[in-house]
Amino acid sequence: MAGALSHIRVLELSRVLAGPWACQLLADLGAEVIKVERPTGGDDTRAWGPPYLRDAQGRDTTESAYYLSTNRNKKSITVDLTKPEGQEIVRQLAAKADVLIENFKVGGLGQYGLAYNHINAVNPRIIYCSITGFGQDGPYSSRAGYDFLVQGMGGLMSITGERDDQPGGGPQKVGVALTDILTGMYAAVGVLAALASRDVTGVGQHIDLALLDVQVACLANQNMNYLISGRSPQRLGNAHPNIVPYQAFPTADGNMILAVGNDSQFTAFCKVVGNAQWADDERFRTNDARVRFRDTLAGMIRDVLRTRPTEEWIDALEAVGVPCGPINNIEQVFQDTQVKHRGMRFEMPHPLSGWVPMVANPLRLSATPVQYDDPPPLLGQHTAEVLKSWLRRSDEEIQSLRDMKIL
């Protein structure tokens, strides 16, 4: 069964995470994605290890786990963009592509004749998506942008971490490069929107996407908490700014999450923990009151939940519809029965190791399901194949380009 985007060709001139994440998502949906890499080293993340994929003898290969996480279903070609011949190859590929995704600094591709205006001149139907730290304009546009930096500048770290008056309090980044991931997803959405528009207008367009813009946009309710109240939200550790009790609590043998979303769930919770009277207490009867008296209530709940192990509390609370759960490490995540049932871990054949473990795409499309055709490619693995199929280059021409160190 053909993928939803099997008619779309994507040229990827990006590296690290945001751009590759967007391109992997499009590739999982069936698009043919050609990843253009430097002949020496390729995508920076290939060397971002350990850990590295191991071969059949247990030896480290050149493929890092980081790189493997975001380059499935692509074809890799190597082209030296600093040389005119390499630039011409990319222009010719772009002339036949539907989408080009790049994450060079502002103006970075212009010096090679590969900016949007150059590519649009040879392919007016191209969807050209530029991902940068701060956008194509503005006082910060020339700066390099990195996820960690933008998590700080964009406000995420100001609301992530334990409260300042608690042990270990202070700003904290998220444990995965979330701004890059969200930017990659916005890029994919923008590309799909532009493709839909092209179906009507017949012409492509330029997408200007900035990590900082994405991070600001994704503060969601915390943004509105500030805009409505005029007060900057503060770090609350694992607590929620607008819902109580909605946080992690210690138990007799570890920790658990309690996520009470409404008053009826709170009443059910109080009965299970043997304190039904809490639900009638004026301080706790409504969520509004519970937010105002959060510290008092949290202390009372903490004292009760410490008396029994996590699993016992979860069984008792789930039985009456109170949302709760364990705090799993990643090994426990992949052992979880629901995660296993949904097939979130699978394996693909790999030329260096025989097999490589992968994490599934969470999209479940009934008519055009996600397909896993190719493992993350080796550096330049498909150079000859792509130049032959896209540009009709002969073996002799390709060898000549190799001799000139263009490929």
Image (cartoon, rainbow, N blue to C red):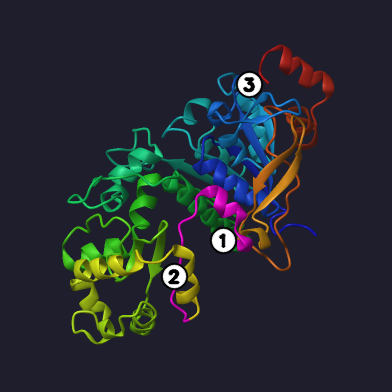
Q: Earlier in the sequence, mark 2 or mark 1?
A: 1
Res. 145 image quadrant: top left
Identified at 55% across, 20% down, the residue is 82
In which quadrant of the rendered image does the N terminus lie? bottom right
| Residue matched to label 2 | 313
Q: In this rendering, is residue 392 above or below 2?
A: above
- Does residue 127 appear anywhere in the picture? no
Q: Nearer the viewer, mark 2 or mark 3?
A: 2
Q: Are marks 2 and 3 in contact (CB under 8 Å)?
A: no
From the viewer's perspective, tell me whether residue 277 is left or right of residue 58. Answer: left
Give the amino acid at mark 1. Answer: Ser
Q: Earlier in the sequence, mark 1 or mark 3?
A: 3
- Does residue 395 appear anywhere in the picture? yes
Q: Nearer the viewer, mark 2 or mark 1?
A: 2
- Residue 81: image location, x then y, percent: 58, 24
- Residue 28: image location, x then y, percent: 67, 51
Q: Are marks 1 and 3 in contact (CB under 8 Å)?
A: no
Tell me the SS state at disc 2.
Answer: helix
From the viewer's perspective, tell me whether residue 262 is left or right of residue 15. Answer: left
Give the amino acid at mark 2. Answer: Trp
Residue 197: mark in rendering: 1
| Residue matched to label 3 | 39
Identified at 54% across, 28% down, the residue is 49
Q: Which residues are magenta?
A: 320-338
Tell me the crowding category of disc 2: few under 14, some 14 to 19, or many 20 or more residues within 10 angstroms, Cα based: many
For the residues marked 1 and 3, what is the alpha-carbon distance in whole angstroms?
A: 35 Å
Q: In this rendering, is residue 301 above or below 275?
A: above
In which quadrant of the rendered image does the C terminus lie? top right
**Front residue (pair 201, 30):** 30
Q: In this rendering, is residue 357 above or below 344?
A: above
For the residues marked 2 and 3, what is the alpha-carbon distance in whole angstroms?
A: 56 Å
**Front residue (pair 115, 374):** 374
